[in-house]
Image: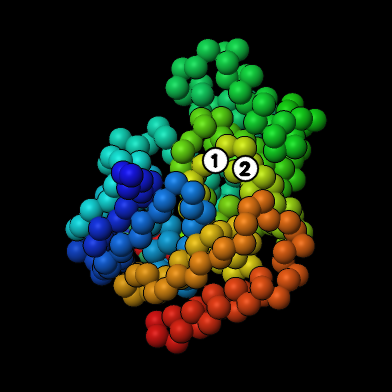
Amino acid sequence: MEPVAPIVKFSSLKKRYGAGPWILEDINLAVAADDFVSLIGPSGCGKSTVLKLISGLSPGTEGGLEVLGTTPKQARDRQAFIFQDATLLPWLTAQRNAELPLRLRRAAAAERAAKARAMLDLVGLAGARDYYPRQLSGGMKMRVSIARALTLSPQLLLLDEPFGALDEMTRNRLNEELLALRERSRFTALFVTHSVSEAVFLSNRVVVMAANPGREHGEVRVDFPYPRPAALRGSPEFLAKVNEVTQLLHQVEATS
Ligand SMILES: Nc1ncnc2c1ncn2[C@@H]1O[C@H](COP(=O)(O)OP(=O)(O)OP(=O)(O)O)[C@@H](O)[C@H]1O
Ligand SMILES: [Mg+2]
């Protein structure tokens, strides 16, 4: 059988801005189609930079990076980026915000309206389509942002601390919803977070990064089957994984 091409493949990648210090050194992360990978590590270790490199927003300095079998830039149409703030346009309704990527691709009006409506339904916002961002809670705004990203049916979803600003209950609910969406849409996910329990709940692989320069320090595999029930969070096996990741983070913090 042919080996399955990885969705993301870093080869000894190094990154610096101009003549500045090395931000990333020797990254060799490989992400497979079925993976939900979380990146966790101290502030400034380069997690957002890793996502920016993949999305083609920023070039590597040395080494290689393949995304979806090609260069990051050429893979742009098949990936979507979700930021910490929902980045909605305040003068557009939820529906219009969700339609925006399809509009930029010049999709027909009927098609983009139907697709955006379907995605807003999926994230539980059928009743809020005509609301403006100021009428939406933080969790609802993030749902619009996710719906907007999914209208393009991305193969790869990059999420940079998307739920960092939300209260814990809302965050937990959105974690469950994100996994449910993934059951339907089957995207590969790369997720940046500062929350160990969020990383463990969502991912099959948690990659712990160290800082100065940013590098992979270790990885914890999380083999709980999907879909994962909310009650998983209370199980001893779950807490054992949380401890494993926390210990790697302590090692990293002691050395950086
Ligand atoms: N455009 C830029 N020009 C110069 N340096 C940059 C630029 N963007 C990021 N950096 C530097 O790169 C390093 C990594 O930044 P990055 O934002 O990737 O970290 P992070 O792990 O996402 O941090 P946080 O957890 O705080 O979001 C930092 O030292 C930062 O100052
Ligand atoms: Mg960041």
**Given the current orientation, which residue lies at the most extreme front position?**
1
SS at circle 1: loop
The type of residue carrying mark 2 is Glu
The type of residue carrying mark 1 is Arg
Q: Which of the 4 quarters of the picture holds residue 225? A: bottom right
Q: Residue at x 75, y 37 (%)?
A: 124
Viewer-proximal residue among 196 and 236: 236
Q: Position of residue 23 (x, y in %)?
A: 31, 66
Label 1 within 8 A of ligand 2 by Cβ: no
In the image, is 244 to the left or to the right of 47?
A: right
Label 2 within 8 A of ligand 2 by Cβ: no
* Above or below for 57 versus 207: above
Q: Residue at x 63, y 53 (%)?
A: 226
The answer, for residue 179, to whether it is visible in the render is yes
Mark 2, residue position: 183
Image quarter (top left, top right, bottom left or bottom right) of the C terminus: bottom left
* Above or below for 8 versus 125: below
- Disc 2 residue crowd, few under 14, some 14–19, many 20+, Cα 10 Å: few
Q: Residue at x 58, y 25 (%)?
A: 99
The answer, for residue 164, to whether it is visible in the render is no
Q: Residue at x 48, y 36 (%)?
A: 154
Viewer-proximal residue among 70 and 166: 70
- Disc 1 residue crowd, few under 14, some 14–19, many 20+, Cα 10 Å: some
Q: Are marks 1 and 2 in contact (CB under 8 Å)?
A: yes
Q: Which of the 4 quarters of the picture holds residue 167? A: bottom right
Mark 1, residue position: 186
Image quarter (top left, top right, bottom left or bottom right) of the N terminus: top left
* Above or below for 191 versus 187: below
Q: CA distance from mark 1 to mark 2?
A: 6 Å
